[in-house]
Image (cartoon, rainbow, N blue to C red):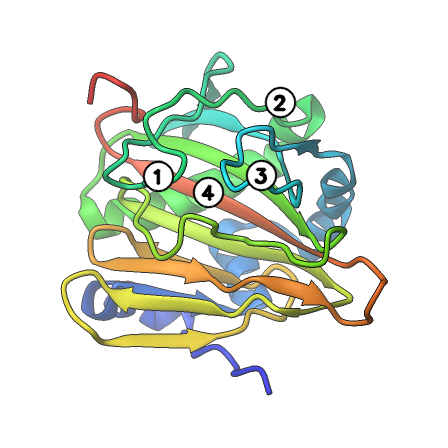
Amino acid sequence: MALAPPLTSLTELDARLANDGFAVLDAPAFSALTDVAPSTFARWAEYWDDLRRDEYLRDGGRYRQRRHGGFVVEGEAVRAVPHRAHWQSLDYNALHGGIERWFEPLHAEFAADPAWFALLRGLARTASRLRGTQPWFVEAHPFRIDTADGIGRPTPEGAHRDGVDLVAVVLVARHSIKGGETRVFDAHGTQGVRFTLQEPWSALLLDDERVVHESTPIQPLVPGRSGHRDTLVITLRRGGFQGPTD
């Protein structure tokens, strides 16, 4: 049986991040944090039907589709940056680090949606309360992990940090799958929790300096019938985007 996530109220969010390094918000709380209406979330879900195959998977898999976008949030101002490669060092991604990975950009109408800017501002305010007010360099990754080949791996690199300050892992949908358990561990100890995000548009927020995280593989709920798990991963980093010169 899937373990329910340990939910945090908005009034407890900052303390939970400061004390434990992570917090889980249900969909209404995430909607309130970001000033995005549930109807907008439902409308956005269609973009996950038009992602592109990840050609960089070093395990030979074909189970991941994605897009990528970059933004800078400074106060209430949000601006998209010219399309850029996603880059992580080997210190943070031993499987796919050290290379420039060029993914298809976010859908233009999605990336320019005023509600999308509101979501980024809400997360940036959270990051500023955690680290202090400053510009935030944001990368957005819509993912679909499918079971067309029998198994899909949300985090093929295993338990990891992302090399940023704040990570938001938002569940968009689960369709005809089992598995996909989320695991969060203290980066400097053995303490950890595990649970399964089930509610669309619920969100896991992570202080990336303090915890590592992973999601277990997914399998089809019905043998021979493909399923998928859709997520939106947003990272916020102070000082600039990650790059080969870091």
Is residue 217 found left or right of 84 in the rendered image? Answer: right
The amino acid type found where label 1 is placed reads: Leu
Residue plotted at (53% across, 36% down): 57
Return the x and y of residue 242 as percentages of the image width and height: 30, 26
Q: Is residue 74 visible?
A: no
Q: Horizontally, is 196 left or right of 19 in the view? A: right
Q: Nearer the viewer, residue 104 or 225?
A: 225
Work out whether mark 1 precedes mark 3 in sequence or the reverse, and give the earlier one.
3
Circles 2 and 1, Cβ within 8 Å, touching? The answer is: no
Disc 1 residue crowd, few under 14, some 14–19, many 20+, Cα 10 Å: many
Q: Name the residue under label 3.
A: 60
Q: Please report whichever mark, 3 or 4, sits nearer to the chain's N-terminal start.
A: 3
Q: Label 1, secondary structure: give it.
A: strand
Whichever of callouts 2 and 4 sits on the residue coming sooner in the sequence is 2
Q: Which of marks 1 and 3 is in front?
A: 3
Left or right: 42 as drawn, with respect to 203: right
Reading the image, the residue beneath label 1 is 236
Q: In this view, does 174 lie above or below 34?
A: below
Residue visible at 19% across and 46% down in the picture: 131
Label 2 or label 4, whichever lies nearer to me, is 2
Between marks 3 and 4 in the image, the one whose residue lies nearer the viewer? 3
Q: How far apart are marks 4 and 1 (CA)?
A: 7 Å
Q: In this rendering, is residue 239 above or below 229?
A: above
Instruction: Categorize mark 2 by other alpha carbons within 10 Å: few (<14), some (14-19), many (20+).
Output: some
> Residue at position x 75%, y 52% from top?
42
Tag 2–tag 3 contact (CB < 8 Å)? no
Which residue does the numbered mark 2 point to in the structure image? 104
- Circle 4 residue: 234
